[in-house]
Each structure stands twice: as C-alpha cells, then as structure tokens.
Image (cartoon, rainbow, N blue to C red):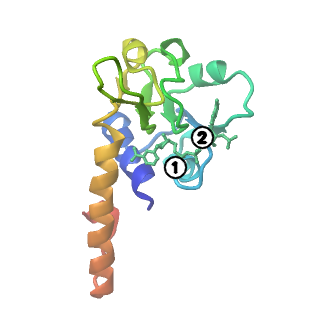
Amino acid sequence: MPCTPAGSMLLIERALGRDLSGLSAVVVGRSNIVGKPMANLLLNANATVTIAHSRTKDLPGLCRSADILVAAVGRPEMIKGDWVKPGATVIDVGINRLPADANGKARLVGDVAYDEAATNAGSITPVPGGVGPMTIALLMANTVISASRAAGRALSLGDS
Ligand SMILES: NC(=O)c1ccc[n+]([C@@H]2O[C@H](COP(=O)([O-])OP(=O)(O)OC[C@H]3O[C@@H](n4cnc5c(N)ncnc54)[C@H](OP(=O)(O)O)[C@@H]3O)[C@@H](O)[C@H]2O)c1
C-alpha cells in the first residue's frame, strides 16, 4: 500500500474505526500517489467517496458535506475553517513551504488553514507532525513487509 494514504488511513481508523459505513469522504486532489489511492482505501473501508480536483464546482460546499475530509492539493491553507463540517475528521496531507518572514524564518503549512479548521473539526492533523511522520512509519512498515515476503514469510500491514 502506498505509504502516505496507508498512514492517513491508520489515523482515520484511530478516530473513526475500521468500518466507515454511512460516512461521506471527500478527497481533494486526484494524484496517483495520494488522491486516487486514498480514495480507494476509503472506499474499501465502506465510506462513500468523492474525489475533487481543480475543475470541481463549489469546492467549499462539497467539502462542507464531508464527514472525512482529506486535503492533498499542494496549496498553502487553501481549505478554510468554514469549509469544514462540524465534527469532521480532517486529514491534511499537504506540505507547503512559505517564504522566510521578516525574521528570516521559513514556515511549513498544510493545505488546510489549521487554526480556523480546528475549531470546527472533530479531529484534525497538524502540519508538520501529522501525515508526514505517518508516511515515514509506513515506509518502514512496508520495508519490513517486503523483507519478510522476500524471506518467504507472509506478512501484511495488519500484522505489523
Ligand atoms: N505528508 C506527506 O507525507 C506527503 C506525501 C506526498 C505528498 N504530500 C503533499 O501533498 C500535496 C499534494 O501532493 P500530490 O503529489 O498529490 O500533488 P499533485 O500531483 O500536484 O496533485 C495536486 C492535486 O490537487 C488538485 N488541485 C490543485 N489546485 C486545486 C484547486 N485550486 N482546487 C482543487 N483542487 C486543486 C489538482 O487538480 P488537477 O488534477 O485538476 O490539476 C491535483 O489533482 C503536496 O503539498 C505534497 O507536498 C505530502
């Protein structure tokens, strides 16, 4: 399983459990490494999934309908607080480096305006410190799984 979506799914499972039946999920972004595999994993967990992208109409309204909102866009703080349904689970995959400020300090931010969104969300991942470390953890897990399989042992993510 690709590391970033798999790590994001573990965070969603922690918040909402493994079965997402009856929940609506919106994934903003349709890349092959994040958006599409993320949507597939959510679908496998029985969520009702919509993939949004740059040609989607009324993105704020669509995001507001989501019980689970995944942002994988690459645009700093594009998703505003009032785009988030009260109580929603928000996964911010974006990593955007803002230019240095007057003190010469650069800053990393996600695709979600965290401070605004956190007041509405039931749970939300920060940037940095949210999906990024999960990606690294899942890269290590996938490495162990591959090594085990190469050694003739059947191991999958659920076992590790
Ligand atoms: N945390 C991690 O470990 C991790 C891992 C991978 C990536 N990332 C970060 O995740 C973000 C996305 O990465 P990616 O590789 O998926 O990016 P990508 O290939 O550039 O895809 C971005 C997606 O966002 C959509 N988009 C762009 N502007 C939009 C807008 N104004 N409204 C709605 N949709 C818009 C694009 O739509 P179109 O298809 O219509 O152009 C595209 O589908 C980046 O910030 C990247 O650095 C983080």
Q: Nearer the viewer, residue 48 or 127?
A: 127
* Whether the residue under disc 1 has CB within 8 Å of ligand 1: yes
In the depicted structure, whether residue 53 falls above or below residue 98:
below
Q: Earlier in the sequence, mark 1 or mark 2?
A: 2
Where is residue 66 drawn, in percent x and y?
55, 26
Q: Nearer the viewer, residue 91 or 87?
A: 91
* Whether the residue under disc 2 has CB within 8 Å of ligand 1: yes
Where is residue 68 drawn, in percent x and y?
49, 31
Asked whether, in this view, residue 155 is left or right of residue 62, the answer is left
Residue 64 appears in the picture as rendered: yes
Mark 1 vs 2: CB contact within 8 A: yes
In the depicted structure, whether residue 26 falls above or below residue 143:
above
Identify residue type, mark 2: Gly
Where is residue 111 drawn, in percent x and y?
48, 30
In the depicted structure, whether residue 150 falls above or below residue 12:
below
Q: Which disc number belongs to residue 96? A: none
Label 2 neighbourhood size at 10 Å, few (<14), some (14-19), many (20+)?
many
Label 1 neighbourhood size at 10 Å, few (<14), some (14-19), many (20+)?
many
Identify residue type, mark 1: Val
Residue 110 lies in quadrant: top left
Residue 154 appears in the picture as rendered: no
- The residue that disc 2 covers is 29
Where is residue 155 drawn, in percent x and y?
30, 73
- Quarter placement of the C terminus: bottom left
Residue drawn at the location 44% of the way across and 62% of the way down: 1
Ligand 1 - quadrant of the structure image: top right
Residue drawn at the location 33% of the way across and 63% of the way down: 157
User: For numbered disc 1, what is the local secondary structure?
Assistant: loop
- The residue that disc 1 covers is 34
